[in-house]
Image (cartoon, rainbow, N blue to C red):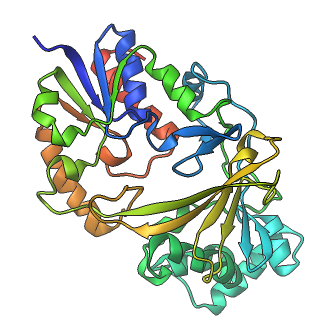
Amino acid sequence: MKKYDYLIVGAGLYGAVFAHQARKRCKTCLVIDKRTHIAGNIYTYNCEGINVHQYGAHIFHTNNKEVWDYVNQFAEFNRYTNSPVANYKGEIYNLPFNMNTFNKMWGVVTPRQAKEKIEQQKSAAGITAPKNLEEQAISLVGTDIYEKLIRHYTGKQWGRPCTELPAFIIKRLPVRFTYDNNYFNALYQGIPVGGYTRMVENMLGDTEVRLGIDYLENKAQLDALAEKTVYTGPVDAYFDYSLGALEYRSVRFETEVLDTDNYQGNAVVNYTDGETPYTRIIEHKHFEFGTQEKTVISREYSAEWSVGDEPYYPVNDDKNGKLYAEYKTLADREENVIFGGRLGEYRYYDMDKVIEAALTVAQKEFGIK
């Protein structure tokens, strides 16, 4: 007899949702994580009374009412709306690209004027069928905005010029011909009051959790504890990189406490010039409308990834897509193992999509919602 019904590898959002759903069906679970804390990359900790997002900013947003209702069981959400700004050599522009951006860039006032300006610059660049990110960006917002707000920022993010990046990456960025500074066009949006760690704690409830445990170093012993494994780590690491390593981008953070109550006046400021080494600065207190006497900021530096580094963003180009497909074939053959989450499925997942995926798998596994 196994001691547990499920071994859940990873105490992040996917693992916590699955554990919660399993508990509702009276299943026993052991959740492990190689980190010394729960909540994965949405982990927050308290510093100077401020909930600091240790692994970068996470703003919850969704159009899925089922997901929104689900997370509201575990946390009360505030009214935070993501409205980042871009700093280009001291010039401040609104993001997403909207009428405020176009007005600041060109002095245009109406949507028609903005569209005409973009079309002029697209035509001047001779773009008909965009072949890469640079051409796709110019076709969407024109040459001026590309040069000031996209080219260098994206180059820093991905560690390669925009001409070498696929066009589809830029299609995720919203372009609006309104004066709306809300980055996410989602019905539901906010930050959990008290931080994400508390929310994940509530999801896990009384599930047994062991931290500082490296699953892959103790795989045989840990697998022997449970009937089935839910694995949310890197899929290529699970197979000991037998087909080669999938590529990621990593992020390095420099966090400091400042003796001021307001450093930059906004939670997120992107630095879009080529000379500034970091991509953005996060001022954490603004996520929860903080009034503390001090503030905490984090500078984010995009970095190349190698085995052993923290993987953040999958590089979803053709080469890695083909390699992942081969790993997925191996994963599908693994009996009694569920691969899930951003690393287990090698895909960029917003938080609501992680929850949606975990709920779908749990529903299939247990026949419940």
Residue 306 x, y percent position in the rendering:
30, 65
**Image height of 306 relative to 14, above or below:** below
Residue 286 x, y percent position in the rendering:
75, 47
Identify which residue is drawn at 24% across, 25% down: 7
User: Quick one: 10 or 155, which is closer to the camera?
Assistant: 10
Please give left or right for residue 329 compared with residue 118 in the image: left
Q: Is residue 59 visible?
A: no
Q: Quadrant of residue 101?
A: bottom right
Q: Looking at the figure, which quarter contains the N terminus?
A: top left
**Image height of 282 relative to 130, above or below:** above
Q: Looking at the figure, which quarter contains the C terminus?
A: top left
Residue 151 x, y percent position in the rendering:
58, 79
User: Quick one: 172 or 287, which is closer to the camera?
Assistant: 287
Identify which residue is drawn at 21% across, 55% down: 325
Identify which residue is drawn at 70% across, 41% down: 48
Q: Quadrant of residue 165?
A: bottom left
Please give left or right for residue 249 compared with residue 266 in the image: left
Q: How many marks?
A: 0
**Image height of 281 relative to 3, above or below:** below
Identify which residue is drawn at 47% across, 44% down: 41
Q: Quadrant of residue 199?
A: top right
Residue 355 x, y percent position in the rendering:
46, 33
Q: Is residue 350 visible?
A: yes
**Image height of 365 relative to 50, above or below:** above
Q: Give the residue furthest to the top.
A: 26
Please give left or right for residue 79 compared with residue 245 in the image: right
